[in-house]
Amino acid sequence: MFNVGIAELKTSRDPGDTLMALGLGSCVAVSVYDSAARVGGVLHFMLPCAKEHESRGSPLKFADTAVPMLLEELERLGGARGNMVARLAGGASMFPNPGGGAGSAGSSGDVGRRNVAADHASLAQCGVRVAGEETGGHRGRTLKLEIGTGRTFVRSIGEPEKEI
Amino acid sequence: MTSSPELSHSQMAALERVGRVGSELAAESLSRIIGRPLRVAASSATLLPFQKVPEVLGGPEAEVVGIYLAIHGAVEGRILLVIPADRAYALTHRMYEPGEVKDADSPRFRVGVTLVADVLAASLLSALSGTTRLPLYSTPTQTVTDMAGAISSQLLAEAGAHSENVLVYRCRFECGELIAEAHWLLAPAPASMNTILEALGV
């Protein structure tokens, strides 16, 4: 069991491994799996777009720079983009109206929705299909990818785990 | 107190002083609300890499109560207070007579939890305004109970947009046999941190 923290990615081809992104709120975790090569990885990012920010820090913070890094890492392990399938969790708005105003687009209350949109855009640009997701809303989530089966699960407090 | 590459030792000491004042204010106010003496057993300030914050809050999946408020006025930014859900419930129970509130999901109990959380969250804002002598205002608070990782993610995204670190205040309260640990996360806008430090004289 490996925890994928904020602004981290982990990949594996060990069928005994499970990769988990715990306690997702506005952050998004994306699991990508190649069932032919039996390799998979999980990325946990927090912001949609690196070029929106002057002081960028780690490229793994941003969907647009981190998604290609995850796919390249999987290719190094033997994966092929044509076989890769993605699943997403997170992108919630835990505090929908943080500024006390109208909760407008572009505010921090909107960052979860923008993270999900940026993830979709980056995956589409890289030619990877999204097969399932559990995103949006106002609750925390944990995503789990089993490398042996390629199955991805999501759970929230007080709810049973479900496959996406 | 932990010094950091982004802030000098004297700057961290000044910011820690704000946290101590906020903790004392919180203890005073909570003591009045719950009708029992509550004291500050420990207080500290740390500048933490944002990746480490969920762990410090009890782990990414720990159930916590989070209170979020925006700061406006001479300083722009956000404050998030995080307290373990079972500790928030235990403090709230002390507001009522034994057996008066049985169900943690009852509306009356939820109002009590929000009141306890509001007092804790507002204390840091009062301390910040009092020690800096800057006019500061807050938006109405928003209270959510969920996983610590999820609760902190929005503030970490705000802070992570321009910094690799977040200012975390930790305070341990004692009320008889009950020990409750609360964390305040402070994320000022980049220019606002300079305003705070200048007003604190460091």
Image (cartoon, coloured by chain):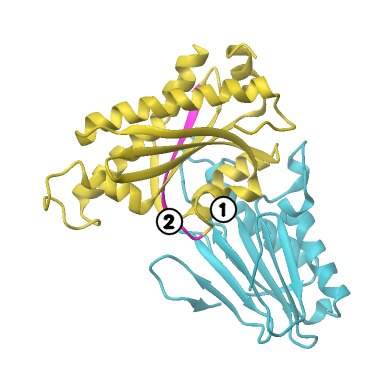
Chain the render paints yellow: B
Q: Kindly identify the amino acid type of the residue bearing the numbered disc 1.
A: Glu
Chain the render paints cyan: A
Q: Are marks 2 and 1 on the same chain?
A: yes
**Which image quarter: residue B41?**
top left
- Quadrant housing the C terminus of chain A: bottom right
User: Viewer-nearest of labels 2 and 1?
Assistant: 1
Q: Residue B55's mark?
A: 1
Q: Position of residue A76 (x, y in %)?
A: 88, 73
Q: Position of residue A131 (x, y in %)?
A: 64, 77
Residue of label 2: B146
Residue at 23% in and 33% down: B33
Residue at 61% in and 40% down: B158
Comes first in the chain, label 2 or label 1:
1
- Quadrant housing the N terminus of chain A: bottom right
Q: Kindly identify the amino acid type of the residue bearing the numbered disc 2.
A: Asp
Residue range in magenta is: B61-72
Q: Is residue B111 above or below residue A45?
A: above
Label 2 vs label 1: CA separation?
15 Å
**Residue A123 among those drawn in magenta:** no
Residue at 64% in and 45% down: B50
